Image (tube, grey):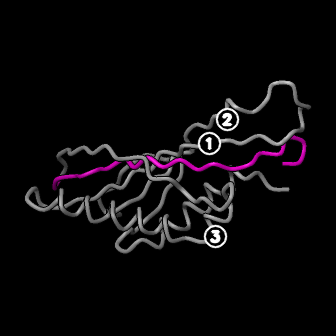
Amino acid sequence: MADPRELILARLAVVAATVEDIRKVKRNEFSQDETVLPLAVILDGDETADERDPVSRPPTAPRIMTMTPEIYLIVADKATTVGTKVNLMRSRFINAVANDAELAALTKDREGGRYEGAASGLSRGRSMIGEVGLSFSFRYVLRPGSI
């Protein structure tokens, strides 16, 4: 059986590639090349087990996990429009995750990804570089001994 965490991360990269105007998707690689912007970067991020799972269970008992990959959308544009473009990419990405049935099917009870918020940043290059880090959480069932 495949690892649900890896399946979700791989599907997230596929979903990112479908977002209008995203020119490249990178996973666990944060180098920025202005020639391939807008860019989506997916970092594997953390995961935690549900604290409500009983401690006195066999080691192969299913666990409910919540993973929180880090997703960055990076765009370059004029200073007057870079913020608008970042916000547009953000909404397109949120919609793509929310509407992807295959991604939802990989999560516990087909919950899909839960949008948790965003943090933005701007920097100067040849043009203004805008970045937004999106927070999503994905719950899934881990079955130790069969991944």
Q: Report the amino acid beneath label 1.
A: Thr
Which of the two marks, 2 or 1, is nearer to us in this view?
Answer: 2
Question: Can you identify the residue that label 1 sits on?
Answer: 66
Q: Report the amino acid beneath label 2.
A: Asp
Query: Element type at marker 3?
Result: helix
Question: Can you identify the residue that label 2 sits on?
Answer: 50
Say whether marks 2 and 1 touch (CB < 8 Å): yes
Q: Quadrant of residue 11?
A: bottom right
Q: Main secondary structure of the magenta part?
A: strand
- Residue 64: x and y, percent? 71, 42
- Residue 82: x and y, percent? 17, 58
Query: Element type at marker 2?
Result: loop
Label 1, residues with CA under 10 Å away: few <14, some 14-19, many ≥20: many
Mark 3 vs mark 2: which is more N-terminal?
2
Label 3, residues with CA under 10 Å away: few <14, some 14-19, many ≥20: some
Q: Residue at x 63, y 48 (%)?
A: 139
Alpha carbon separation for disc pair 3 and 2: 23 Å
